[in-house]
Image (spheres, helix red, strand yellow):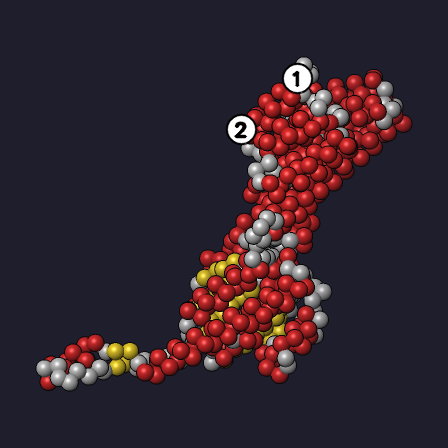
Amino acid sequence: MPDTRALTRLFDELLWRLRRGGFRIPTAEALDALRAVRAVGLEDRWALAESLAAVVVERASDRSRFDRIFDDFFARGTHAVPLLDRLRGLGFSPEEVSALRDELERLATSASGDAEHLGALLERGAELDRLLALAGMSRTLPSIQSSIQLGFVTYRVLGELGVGRAEATLARLRGYLREALGEARGTALADALRAELARAEGDVRAYLTDRLAARVEEENAGPHPRRLDTKAFTSLGDVEMEEAKRAVRAFAERLRGAERVRVRRARRGRVHLSRTMRRAMRTGGVPFVLLRARRRRDKPRLMLLCDISDSVRAAARFMLELVYAAQDLFDETRSFVFVSEIAETTRLFASQPVTIALGQAYGGGVVSVAANSNYGRVLRSFEKDHLGEVDRRTTVVILGDGRTNYHDDASEVLDRIRARARALVWLCPESRAGWLLGDSAMNRYAPKCTAVFEALSVRDLEVAARKVVALR
């Protein structure tokens, strides 16, 4: 019978690695898996893998990923070694390790609890997994739509894990170790702890990277991969990008066709029921003549403001493609692009083919694309130069992720735009789960708009475009 404590620790480490690899293992399943591991023991690797897979793996397509993680875990096994044992393996004496353990225990039991996060981060493995669970990874991970966001999300997660506090505690611990063990040995032990803390930060980055990769693999795996029209703009390859462009243009053609039908029906007019009945009463309904009412509807105007910074460039490209292809749905279509500054591109898109116009816009020929987004400056500039041109026939559409880089968001400007416009619509190429993270101002922009739509894929863009057209 294997040692219970050793088995439990090994199981915790393996479970942590599987969760990091994208497997969803709730507490009930974890207990079932532990019972299975206890039943078969550790001697027979094949029996261990099969019994654990029977509990953890839900779909046949996930088995290969499980096998890779399982084999890699037992090939390396570094996280299963406790911190103090790793330090002994680096050549630190039992007395030095004992002095460190005593100080960590003292800090952990102090009123400030300074060593709580430091101890878990240095231990890594399952202890780090618990910290990640407490940091709300189930809410954070869905907000990551592309590798572009990984850096910011990683920085935020490290902050929630208490890495800053851990580094401050480690700095104080360095002074204690120097006094207790001498300058040389105390500094060496503190440096070893700093290296372990750096490895823990690397584990967090690797965890987030692996989870994003696992989600993309899951979405595209199986006999029915995710359809192109529902695939995120940020995950499209070059060939898929061209296919998606053709889909957007085809959708624009359908919109134009629907508009032509609407115009024909408008010319014919709708049956005016009350007037028809009054006329019929004169002749007893013989003959029965349908009287129609024609309603004059002015074509609306459209003003489109597109963020073309790196984080939203893919979605903006498709939106500009759509507007270029369907601009005759509106009496007047004006387009603007912005990053830190805003500039009008109406003439550029009217005089150049869409590919050349987009190339100039994204190449920095209209506004600088090297700067960071500044929504406050852009909105105030639009208000100053163009608000007077907005009237009750104008639909204003803004495409952007609302990430201000911690500049003033100028959300009050949207109130003044909405007060003058027929409608103010915001298309955000980021899921709502990320609107409360970091420098996003979408939670302040959204209440100011007539409608807000997520625009993560071609399907989302189609839905939003239909809504914009319906607002006419």
Q: If the image is split into quadrants, where does the C terminus sit?
A: bottom left
Crowding near the residue tagged with mark 2, few <14, some 14–19, many ≥20 C-alpha atoms within 10 Å: few
Towards the viewer: 394 or 215: 215
Towards the viewer: 439 or 129: 129
Q: Position of residue 464 (x, y in %)?
A: 48, 64
Residue at numbered disc 1: 4
The three-letter amino acid code for the residue at tag 2 is Ala
Q: Secondary structure at mark 1?
A: helix
Can residue 135 be seen in this snapshot?
Answer: no
Towards the viewer: 268 or 124: 268
Towards the viewer: 39 or 133: 39
Residue at the limit of the structure toward the top, as seen here: 1
Residue at numbered disc 2: 28
Q: Is residue 173 above or below residue 462?
A: above
Q: Which mark is residue 121?
A: none
Can residue 45 be seen in this snapshot?
Answer: yes
The three-letter amino acid code for the residue at tag 1 is Thr
Crowding near the residue tagged with mark 1, few <14, some 14–19, many ≥20 C-alpha atoms within 10 Å: few
Q: Residue at x 66, y 64 (%)?
A: 239
In 3D space, how far apart are the residues under numbered discs 1 and 2 (Cα atoms)?
A: 19 Å
Q: Position of residue 306 (x, y in %)?
A: 58, 68
Total number of numbered labels?
2
Q: Secondary structure at mark 2?
A: helix
Q: Residue at x 17, y 82 (%)?
A: 288
- Is 343 on the left or on the right of 123, as rendered? left
Q: Position of residue 216 (x, y in %)?
A: 63, 50
Q: Residue at x 56, y 52 (%)?
A: 224
Q: If the image is split into quadrants, where does the N terminus sit?
A: top right
